[in-house]
Image: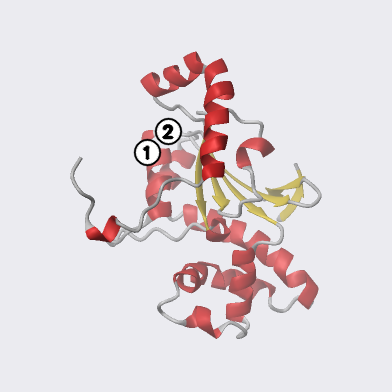
C-alpha cells in the first residue's frame, strides 16, 4: 500500500469501544443472519420508504418503526430540513439523496420526521431572534443551513415564548414538505400516485409520534 498523503496523516484507528461493539455484532447478529446480509449485498436494496431525519443521536429511526436492514432509506441532516429545488451545479447532499430515492430506488413513501428539543431548531430560533450573531456569519455552515427555516420562524414568532420552539420544530417538517414539492420528479411521482409524502413529529421523552393531517392542518396522534 502506498504512503498516505500528508493531509491524511491525522487519521487514527477506530476507538477501542467501537471495535469491541463491532466484534460483538459480527459474532452475534451478523453470524445469525449471514444469509440475509449476503442476499442484501447481492440483490441490492429495495426500500419502500425514505426517511429524512435529524442528525440528533436520540432519534433512532429504525427502532421507532421496527425496521430491519434494507427496509428504510435514511438521510440525516441538521433539523431534518429539505432545501428548495436548486439545480445550480453546487453540492446538494439532501437533494441528491431525494433524487436517488425517488428516481432510482422508486420509494413509495417519503417521510420527514422532526423531534422535540431539537438543537438545530433552537439555533434557528436564536439566530432569527437576534441572540446568536455567530450564526449570521456567512462562514457558519449551520446558520446558512438554518436559513431554510426562516419562513417557519416568521410563522411562529408571534406565539407565546414557551410555545415558539415546539411550533418551530413542526414548521421544520412543513417547510421541508413544501420544498419537496418544488422538485419536479417528486411532484410527478405524487401526481402519478407512485409516491406519498408524510410529516411526523417525535416526542423523545414521551415516545409519542404525531402525524401531520392536512385535513385538519395540524399534527395528530399516529
Numbered mark located on residue 103 in the image: 1
The residue depicted at 73 percent of the width and 52 percent of the height is 219
Residue 8 visible:
yes
Q: Where residue 45 sits in the image (x, y, percent)?
A: 43, 27
Q: Which residue is mark 2?
A: 106
Where in the figure is residue 208, as x and y percent of width and height?
78, 46
Q: Determine crowd level at label 2: few under 14, some 14-19, many 20+ residues with C-alpha closer than 10 A.
A: some
Q: For numbered disc 1, what is the local secondary structure?
A: helix
Position of residue 100 in the picture relative to residue 132 (left or right): left
Question: To which quarter of the image does residue 89 belong?
Answer: bottom left
The number of numbered badges drawn on the structure is: 2
Closer-to-camera residue (26/107)? 26
Q: CA distance from mark 2 to mark 1?
A: 6 Å
Q: Nearer the viewer, residue 199 or 116?
A: 116
Residues at discs 2 and 1 in contact (Cβ within 8 Å): yes
Q: Residue at x 49, y 30 (%)?
A: 47
Amino acid at each position: 500500500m502506498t504512503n498516505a498523503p500528508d493531509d491524511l496523516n491525522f487519521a487514527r484507528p477506530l476507538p477501542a469501544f467501537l471495535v469491541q461493539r463491532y466484534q460483538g455484532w459480527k459474532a452475534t447478529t451478523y453470524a445469525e443472519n449471514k444469509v440475509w446480509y449476503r442476499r442484501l449485498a447481492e440483490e441490492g436494496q429495495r426500500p419502500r420508504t425514505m426517511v429524512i431525519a435529524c442528525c440528533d443521536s436520540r432519534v433512532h429511526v429504525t427502532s421507532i418503526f421496527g425496521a430491519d436492514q434494507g427496509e428504510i432509506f435514511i438521510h440525516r441532516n441538521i433539523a431534518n430540513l429539505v432545501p428548495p429545488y436548486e439545480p445550480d451545479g453546487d453540492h446538494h447532499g439532501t437533494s441528491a439523496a431525494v433524487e436517488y430515492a425517488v428516481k432510482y430506488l422508486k420509494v413509495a413513501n417519503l417521510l420527514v420526521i422532526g423531534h422535540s428539543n431539537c438543537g438545530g431548531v433552537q439555533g434557528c430560533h436564536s439566530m432569527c431572534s437576534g441572540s446568536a450573531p455567530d450564526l449570521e456569519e456567512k462562514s457558519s455552515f449551520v446558520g446558512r443551513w438554518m436559513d431554510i427555516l426562516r419562513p417557519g420562524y416568521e410563522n411562529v414568532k408571534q406565539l407565546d415564548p414557551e410555545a415558539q420552539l415546539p411550533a418551530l420544530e413542526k414548521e421544520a417538517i412543513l417547510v421541508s414538505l413544501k420544498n419537496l414539492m418544488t422538485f419536479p420528479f417528486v411532484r410527478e411521482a405524487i401526481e402519478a400516485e407512485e409516491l406519498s409524502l408524510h410529516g411526523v413529529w417525535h416526542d423523545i421523552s414521551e415516545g409519542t409520534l404525531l402525524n401531520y393531517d392536512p385535513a385538519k392542518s395540524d399534527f395528530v396522534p399516529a
